[in-house]
Amino acid sequence: MSNAAAAEAPPPAPKGKKKLIIIAASAALLLSVAGGGAFVLLKKKPADADEEGADEVAQVEDAPKAKAKHDPKAVPVFVPLEPFTVNLADRETERYAQIAVTLEVTDAKAGEQVKAFLPAVRNNILMVLAHKTSEELLQREGKTQLAAEIRRETARALGVDPEPEAPRADPKKKGAAKKKPEPVVLPVTAVHFSNFIVQ
C-alpha cells in the first residue's frame, strides 16, 4: 500500500527550481508594487496641477478675501434659480444668452434668505448679464468673472457689502499702522452654471 502511494505521488521538485520560482514570484511582486506606486504618483501630479489651477481661479475671484475651507462632513446647500434669458451688450449684432444658475450657500439659513430676497437677487444678476458681450461670455475667463460678479451682486441683494471700507488712519496719531479690513464672508460660496447658451 505504501509502495502504491509512493508510485502515485509526483516526484519532489529539485531544490534549484523552487528557488527559481520563489525568486521569480518575488520579482513579480516587487514590480507590481513599484508599478502601482508609480501610477499613484503620476496620477497625483495632474490632480495637484488641477488644484493649483483651481486655487489660481479662486485667488483671482477672491484676491482680498480669505479662502473658504469646505467641511467635508457638511452637506452643501444649493439654491437653483430659474433660467435667465437676456439680450447681450453686443453692438454689431443682436445676441442673447440663456443661463441657468445654481447658488451654493453657506447654510440652510442663507438659502432661505436668498429665497426671501429672490426678486432683488434676480434683478442684480440680470443687470450683470445685460452688460456682458457674447465675446466675454464665450471665454472661460469671462465665465469665471461672471460667477464672481453674480456672487458679489447676490450678496448686495441680501444686504451684505462685499467690499468693506478700509479703516481710516487717525491723523492725530502719526506713524499709526493702517489695518487691513477683515475679509467679508459672503453668503454665497460658489456659483454653478447648469446651462449656458449664447446665441
Image (spheres, rainbow, N blue to C red):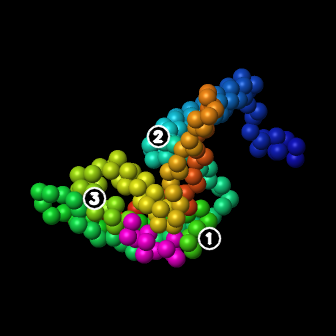
Instruction: Give the vertical position of 169 relative to 79 (above or below).
Output: above
- Which amino acid, mark 2? Glu
Q: What stretch is highlighted in magenta?
A: 114-124
Tell me whether the residue at label 1 lies in contact with that at label 2, contact meaning CB atoms closer than 8 angstroms. Answer: no
Whether residue 192 is visible here, answered yes or no, is no
- Which amino acid, mark 1? Lys
Secondary structure under badge 3?
loop
Secondary structure under badge 2?
helix
Instruction: Give the vertical position of 195 relative to 184 (above or below).
Output: below
Q: Name the residue under label 3.
A: 131
Q: How crowded is mark 3: few (under 14 residues within 10 Å), some or many (20 or more)?
A: few
Q: How crowded is mark 1: few (under 14 residues within 10 Å), some or many (20 or more)?
A: few
Which residue in the rendered view is the most extreme toward the left?
A: 92
Q: Nearer the viewer, residue 68 or 130?
A: 130
Q: Mark 3 against mark 1, which lies toward the viewer?
A: 3
Which residue is rendered at x = 87% and y = 47% of the image? 1
Q: 119 left or right of 139?
A: right
Magenta-span inclusion, residue 122 = yes
Of the image marks 1 and 2, the number of the one nearer the N terminus = 2
The secondary structure making up most of the magenta span is helix
Task: Specify the label residue 61 is tagged with.
Answer: none
Q: Name the residue under label 2.
A: 56
Task: Specify the label residue 109 is tagged with.
Answer: 1
Q: 125 left or right of 180?
A: left
Q: How far apart are marks 3 and 1 (CA)?
A: 31 Å
